[in-house]
C-alpha cells in the first residue's frame, strides 16, 4: 500500500496526478482510520544504525527508523538533553509528519496551535500583514501550525524513541568516523561498527567535513544575531495595554530597518517568548560569551525607539543571551559511503521561515522512507543517493527562502517598505489576493512550504531507477 502525496491510499482506478492538485483529496475520507498511520511493515532486514546527536534531527531520525524496525542507537555528547529558554515552531509540513509518526499523544500536552501571524510596523505596531492559520489553513495542509518549548519537544521525542526501543547513550561523544566501514570512535576509545552512520551533530558539526566538497560550504556568521528571552505572562497580564497581544495564540512580528522582533506564547499560554534580531557588530562573540548585564542593556538600546507597547515588554525582560545567527552551508552532497549528515549539520539556516526543525523532521522521514524501499543491504547506497538528491534541493531552497525573508522584512522606511506594505494590504483587510510579500501568506510559497510531501518526492525519485 502506498500513501501518496495527499495522504490517501493509492487506488489503481484513481492514481494521484503528477501535478500538484488536490482534486482527489476527498479520497482521504474513505481510508481515514485513527491517526497516526500504522507502523510501516517490518524492514526486510533490520539495519544496525548509529546516530550522532540527540537534537531534533537525531531524535526524529531515530523514531522514523525504529518504526521500520531498524535497531537504532544515538550517541549524544551532552550529559542531559537541553533545557534552554526558547520556543520553536512546528509548521504544518512538520506537524503533519509528527502526527503520522505517532507523536501526537506525546506532544498534545505541550503544543499550542497558532491562529495568526501578524506582521507589524516597527514604529507603532500597526498591522501591515496577516496570515490566518484557522480552519481553512488547517484543512488545506492537513495539520495545525504549532509552537512548543524546545525542551518539551526534545522530551516528547525522547519518550517516544525510548518506547520504540531506541538506545540513547548520553555522555557519548564521537571523535572520529570511518565512512566506508562504516564505524565511529567514541571519546573513550571504543570503536562502534554499524550498517549506517547518521551524523545529526548540529550547526557546529565536526562530521560535515567528511562529505565531498563540504569545506567549501561551512556555515558562516550572517552579520545578524538575536536576543532571546522568556517572560512570565502573569506580569504582562497586569498591564491592559498588553492585553491585545495576549488574547489570541498568535505570532507577532515587528519589522524595521535591519531588525525584527518575533513573539509568541508557549506552555498553554503561560510563557511569552521573544526573539529580537539585530545587526551584529560584535560578530565572533558566541552564545554565553556576552556578559548578561551588557546583553540586557544592548538589547534595550537596539529597540529603544520602537513601538511603545513592544518596548514596554522588552523592558520587562530580566535575562537574555545573544545568539549569533549562522547560515550558508549549501552543501551539494550529504552522503559519503555509508555515512550521511542531516539536520543543521547539513543545512544550517536562518530562522526567518521558522523551518529549521521542520526541515530536520522532513529529512528524518525522507531517509526512513527511502531506506524502506530497499530489499538488500547492497541497495543502501542507492537509497542514500535518492535521499540526498531530494533533500539537498529542498533544504537549499528553504535556506534561500529564509535569506529572502530577512531581506523583505528588513527594509528601512522608504519606497521598498511602502510598496511591500501596500502589497500586503489585501490580506490585512481580508480581501482576496494571489500573491504577497509575506511568504507565510503568499499562496505559491505556502503550498511549496507547508504542502510539501517528502515521501512522495522520494517515491518519484525512486521511480527513475530500475531496481
Ligand atoms: C538553542 C537553540 C534555539 C533555536 N531556536 C530556533 C528557533 O527559534 N527557530 C528555528 O527555526 N530554529 C531554531 N533553532 C534551530 C533548530 O532547533 C534546528 O534547526 C533544529 O532543531 C535541527 O537541529 P539539529 O538536531 O540538527 O541540531 P541540534 O539541535 O544542534 O543537535 C545536535 C546535537 O548533536 C550533539 N553533538 C554534537 N557533536 C557531537 C559529537 N561529536 N558526539 C555526540 N553528540 C554530538 C549536540 O550536543 C546536540 O545535542 C535553535 C537551535 C538552538 C540550538
Image (spheres, rainbow, N blue to C red):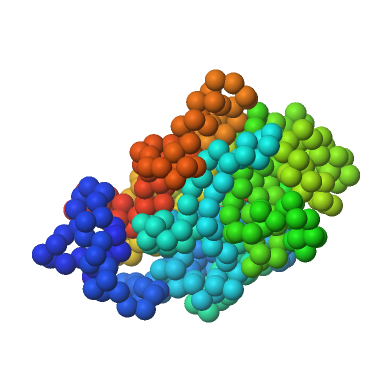
Give the position of the N terminus as an image quadrant: bottom left
* Residue placed most toward the observer, 132 or 279: 132
Instruction: Measuring from the top left, give residue 397's x and y in whole percent.
Output: 43, 39
Compared with residue 49, is residue 458 higher up or lower down, i.e. above or below?
Answer: above
Horizontal relation, residue 161 to residue 326: left or right = left
Residue at x 36% of width, y 78% of height: 34
Residue at the farthest top position: 415
Instruction: Measuring from the top left, give residue 259's x and y in whole percent.
Output: 66, 34
Q: Would residue 401 be seen by someone viewing this image from the given angle?
A: no
Give the position of the C terminus as an image quadrant: bottom left
Compared with residue 50, is residue 426 higher up or lower down, i.e. above or below?
Answer: above
Q: Would residue 118 be seen by someone viewing this image from the given angle?
A: yes
Numbered-mark total:
0
Compared with residue 402, is residue 168 higher up or lower down, i.e. above or below?
Answer: below
* Residue placed most toward the observer, 44 or 80: 80
Residue at the farthest right position: 293
* Residue placed most toward the observer, 398 or 390: 398
Compared with residue 143, is residue 37 higher up or lower down, i.e. above or below?
Answer: below
Horizontal relation, residue 365 to residue 169: left or right = left
Image quadrant assignment for residue 196: bottom left
* Residue placed most toward the observer, 368 or 433: 433
Residue at x 77% of width, y 64% of height: 234
Residue at x 59% of width, y 51% of height: 251
Image quadrant assignment for residue 235: bottom right
Residue at x 48% of width, y 39% of height: 438
Instruction: Measuring from the top left, give residue 180's x and y in whole percent.
Output: 45, 52
Instruction: Measuring from the top left, give residue 383's x and y in whole percent.
Output: 33, 55
Amino acid at each position: 500500500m502506498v500513501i501518496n502525496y495527499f495522504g490517501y491510499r493509492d487506488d489503481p482506478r484513481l492514481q494521484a496526478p503528477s501535478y500538484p492538485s488536490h482534486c482527489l483529496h476527498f479520497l482521504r475520507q474513505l481510508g481515514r482510520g485513527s491517526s497516526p498511520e500504522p507502523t510501516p511493515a517490518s524492514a526486510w532486514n533490520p539495519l544496525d544504525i548509529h546516530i550522532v546527536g540527540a537534537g531534533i534531527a537525531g531524535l526524529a531520525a531515530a523514531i522514523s527508523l525504529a518504526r521500520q524496525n531498524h535497531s537504532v542507537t544515538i550517541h549524544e555528547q551532552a550529559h542531559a538533553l537541553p533545557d534552554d529558554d526558547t520556543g520553536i515552531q512546528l509548521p504544518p509540513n512538520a506537524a503533519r509528519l509528527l502526527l503520522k509518526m505517532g507523536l501526537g499523544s506525546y506532544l498534545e500536552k505541550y503544543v499550542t496551535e497558532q491562529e495568526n501571524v501578524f506582521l507589524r510596523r516597527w514604529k507603532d505596531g500597526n498591522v501591515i500583514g496577516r496570515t490566518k492559520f484557522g480552519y481553512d489553513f488547517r484543512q488545506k495542509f492537513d495539520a495545525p501550525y504549532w509552537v512548543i518549548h524546545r525542551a518539551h519537544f526534545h522530551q516528547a521525542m525522547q519518550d517516544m524513541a525510548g518506547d520504540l526501543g531506541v538506545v540513547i547513550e548520553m555522555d557519548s561523544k564521537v571523535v572520529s568516523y570511518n565512512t566506508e566501514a562504516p564505524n565511529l570512535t567514541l571519546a573513550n576509545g571504543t570503536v562502534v561498527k554499524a550498517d549506517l552512520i547518521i551524523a545529526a551533530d548540529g550547526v557546529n558539526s565536526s562530521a560535515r567535513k567528511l562529505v565531498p566538497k563540504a569545506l567549501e560550504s561551512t556555515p558562516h556568521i550572517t552579520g545578524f544575531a538575536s536576543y532571546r528571552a522568556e517572560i512570565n505572562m502573569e506580569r504582562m497580564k497586569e498591564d491592559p495595554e498588553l492585553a491585545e497581544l495576549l488574547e489570541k495564540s498568535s505570532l507577532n512580528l515587528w519589522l524595521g530597518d535591519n531588525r525584527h522582533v518575533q513573539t509568541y506564547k508557549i506552555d498553554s499560554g503561560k510563557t511569552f517568548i521573544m526573539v529580537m534580531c539585530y545587526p551584529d557588530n560584535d560578530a565572533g562573540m558566541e552564545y554565553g560569551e556576552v556578559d548578561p548585564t551588557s546583553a540586557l542593556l544592548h538589547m534595550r538600546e537596539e529597540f529603544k525607539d520602537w513601538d511603545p507597547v513592544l518596548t514596554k515588554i522588552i523592558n520587562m525582560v530580566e535575562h537574555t543571551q545573544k545568539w549569533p545567527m549562522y547560515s550558508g552551508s549549501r552543501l551539494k552532497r550529504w552522503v559519503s559511503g555509508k555515512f550521511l549528515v542531516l539536520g543543521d549539520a547539513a543545512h544550517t539556516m536562518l530562522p526567518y521561515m521558522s523551518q529549521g526543525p521542520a526541515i530536520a523532521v522532513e529529512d528524518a522521514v525522507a531517509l526512513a522512507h527511502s531506506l524502506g524501499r530497499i530489499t538488500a543491504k547492497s541497495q543502501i547506497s542507492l537509497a542514500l543517493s535518492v535521499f540526498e538528491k531530494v533533500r539537498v534541493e529542498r533544504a537549499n531552497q528553504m535556506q534561500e527562502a529564509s535569506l529572502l525573508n530577512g531581506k523583505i522584512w528588513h527594509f528601512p522606511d522608504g519606497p521598498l517598505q511602502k510598496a511591500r506594505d501596500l502589497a500586503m494590504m489585501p490580506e490585512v483587510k481580508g480581501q482576496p489576493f494571489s500573491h504577497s510579500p509575506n511568504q507565510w501568506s503568499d499562496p505559491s510559497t505556502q503550498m511549496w512550504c507547508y504542502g510539501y510531501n517528502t515521501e512522495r518526492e522520494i517515491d518519484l525519485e525512486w521511480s527513475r531507477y530500475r531496481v
